Amino acid sequence: MMSIEPVLFYIFSTILVIAAAAVVTVRNPVYAALCLVLAFFTCAAIWLMLEAEFLALVLILVYVGAVMVLFLFVIMMLDINLARSKEGFIKYLPAGGFVALLIFIEMCIVLGPENFGIEVTGEPLKHAADYSNTKELGVTLYTQYVYPFEIAGALLLLAIVAAIALTMRKRPDSKYQDPAMQVAVRREDRVRIVKMATEKKQ
Amino acid sequence: MIELLLSIWNLVPEALQILLIIILKVVVIAVPIMLAVAYITLAERKVIGYIQVRIGPNRVGPRGLLQPIADGLKLVLKEIIIPTNANRFLFVIAPLLALAPALACWAVIPFADGWVLADIDAGLLYVLALSSMGVYGLIIAGWASNSKYAFLGAMRSAAQMVSYEIAMGFALVGVLMAAGSMNLSAIVESQSGSFIHWFWLPLFPLFLVYFIAGLAETNRAPFDVAEGESEIVAGFHVEYSGMAFALFFLAEYANMILISILTVIMFMGGWLSPFQGIPGLEALFSFVPGIVWILAKTCFLLLLFLWFRATFPRYRYDQVMRLGWKVFIPITILWILVIGVGVMAEIGPWFD
């Protein structure tokens, strides 16, 4: 009996290729972003079939759950003028086409079957049910590659701090509230009860 | 009769047999969830009613017990209105995108020892990844409605859910450090021992952060700024009607149950009996199956959801953000360090 795995692989990879092509071809940028989400999702499904469940789930968590949400957030707030963005398409076509062709050739050279064919890499190993990809990755990252890993982490932290420091500007006219002060407020600061004699009716 | 059924069953090809059994399991999980969702709406109205010294719904059926059925029927029969200039495709697909992740998460939830549909090793990560998908339903609904209020609600919910997901993720990191596994069944097993062994005690700040962040993730009061009926009429679902509207509520309530049961699994010992390790009481209550304990604990947390809604006023939007980023994330990072020290020093009875 034929295994179900190749069938699933071809279904997922077809969806992935179509979604990836749609990202750059659909006109509506919101649709393009959603196609990218679909592409990430099917990519994660293919990684799952390669027994890389940790990477697959992290791909969904980070790119689908956080990055693309923020992308959509920004895209939806833009007023996108489709007619203007298509201006000068013919003018840029030769240069753009040349770059695309160059990248295509380069990728063919690097990713061709002579480097990544089944004879070179061998058939992916099938592991037993108790094999944990997460554990395997963790052990490799924290023993063999611990310094590169930590350096990459420090660089990312630096980039976060730098991005915030570069874009943050305190506007002198904006008003802030201090919640600690709001919580610490006492009745005596706000209300003054005045005792006064009742007035007689004239 | 049974032999006849068995012989028919044996004629079915093996691959199809496995598929049928899985579908049956899915139905066995999904149908009670849907029923629970329906009856939580009734429980919510009753509980809030009693808190406010009212009776709540009591007209349909005995003591109002058929009220959810009547509500469901009404919503099914109502017309789904699609606004002019709305993006039809996305408008229709958005409620489904909200509901599907909320249901898919249930695949890895263990209801008792071994009672789980998919016993995967990365269960915790799976839950986190899928629950982060739910926000798309809200954003797309808000954008596709072509309405200012819906759009504002969508923006608010996107920002809120992304912010609280970080605190939630850190809380989960603490749990997986303490349990040493991402498999939800293994997490429950590692809390075995007694009431004191459950993770609510060593991970108390994370327990609180996780549950409160769960409130914010499900857009429940006091964090329901995405809905904000007094500010932006009803937020992202203002243009929805009929069954499309109902699907958003199904998703919200299914997420509520999910957050409650996950809190129970990670911090309150899952299906373990609270009398475990107490001489006398343990033997007395040993006849109670695990699923009763897990459901009882989940019901208690669900009651908290309803109680909060009746008790707290809505947060102001900037305060929601402050709580998530400036309070919860520092607390969780600090407590992860504490757990790290605890695990290294093998402090008992949790980390030895």
Image (cartoon, rainbow, N blue to C red):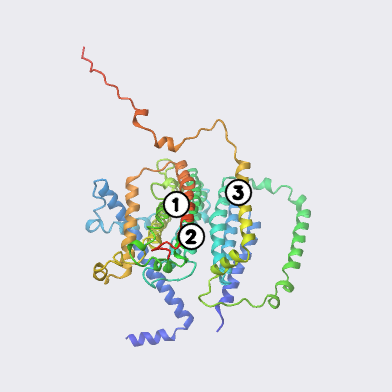
* Snapshot quadrant of residue A52: bottom right
Residue at numbered disc 3 = A160
**Chain letter of the residue beneath label 1 in the structure image:** B
Q: Secondary structure at mark 2?
A: helix
Marks 2/1 same chain: yes
Is A163 situated above or below B13?
Answer: above
Task: Count residues near mark 3 (Cα–Cα under 10 Å), then give few for <14, some for 14-19, many for 20+.
Answer: few
Q: Amino acid at mark 3?
A: Ile
- Residue A2 drawn at (x, y percent): 56, 82
Residue at numbered disc 1 = B81
Q: Tell which of B347 and A140 is nearer to you.
A: B347
Pointers 2 and 1 in contact (C-beta within 8 Å): no
Q: Tell which of B203 and B306 is nearer to you.
A: B203
- Residue A81 drawn at (x, y percent): 64, 45
Q: Quadrant of the N terminus of chain B?
A: bottom left
- Residue A144 drawn at (x, y percent): 62, 66
Is A122 situated above or below B10?
Answer: above
Marks 3/2 same chain: no
Q: Is residue B223 visible?
A: yes
Is B116 situated above or below B12?
Answer: above
* Snapshot quadrant of residue B300: bottom left
Q: Amino acid at mark 1?
A: Ile
* Snapshot quadrant of residue B273: bottom left
Judge left or right: residue B253 versus residue B142: left
Judge left or right: residue B62 versus residue A142: left
Q: Tell which of B61 and B292 is nearer to you.
A: B292
Residue located at (76% from left, 64% from top): A106
Pointers 1 and 3 in contact (C-beta within 8 Å): no
Give the number of the mark in front: 1 or 3: 3
- Residue B283 drawn at (x, y percent): 25, 71
Q: Is residue A79 visible?
A: no
